[in-house]
Amino acid sequence: MPSEQTACVFCAIAAGSAPAQVILQDPHTLCILDINPFSQGHCLVIPRRHVPWWHELSAPETASLFEIARQGANLLMEAFQPEMVTMYARGRRIPHTHIFLVPTRQGEVLDGFFNALERFQEAPTHLAGLGQPQALAEAAQRLLAAQKTR
Ligand SMILES: [Zn+2]
């Protein structure tokens, strides 16, 4: 049975054993075209190492990932002149960190999705409760306590 890494398409791309349109790369990171784009030029920024969640990367890998993302976003702005480049990181479907760089214009699919998400953010009462001063103070207190244990 193949290990998680050998079954991972992003590991295969990083190893050069699966095809990809590589736009940028450095020793830690690749920027490739997404084969199921949300818009023309949609790229993925992936670490060479198999790391499921972006916050598990080392500090040098993180610096590389975000620098390549910044360079990729600027190439997308120049090549496609979108309004902006939307960036987000997931990793649930393919458990190898990948940052989405999506050239975005008003009214496009991803713009509509994030607009809907922002409208939703304000709707449910349990989320509205999290925005109350007492709840924000509690969240800040928990984060500051976590910081002290590091
Ligand atoms: Zn992988």
Image (tube, rainbow, N blue to C red):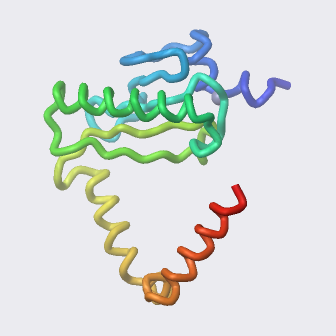
Q: Position of residue 26 (x, y in %)?
A: 47, 16
Tell me what residue is drawn at x 66 percent, y 64 percent.
146
Quarter of the image with the N terminus in it = top right
Compared with 12, 65 (above or below) is below
Tell me what residue is drawn at x 53 percent, y 74 percent.
140
Direction from residue 122 to residue 76 in the image, left or right:
left
Which residue, as the protein is rendered here, is positioned at the far right? Answer: 1
Q: Position of residue 91 (x, y in %)?
A: 57, 44
Compared with 88, 127 (above or below) is below
Direction from residue 28 to residue 99 in the image, left or right:
left
Tell me what residue is drawn at x 17 percent, y 53 percent.
106
Q: Which of the 4 image quarters holds residue 142? A: bottom right
Q: Which of the 4 image quarters holds residue 17? A: top right
Compared with 115, 100 (above or below) is above
Tell me what residue is drawn at x 42 percent, y 23 percent.
32
Direction from residue 81 to residue 104 in the image, left or right:
right
Direction from residue 81 to residue 53 in the image, left or right:
right
Q: Which of the 4 image quarters holds residue 61? A: top right
Q: Ligand 1 is found in which quarter of the picture? A: top right
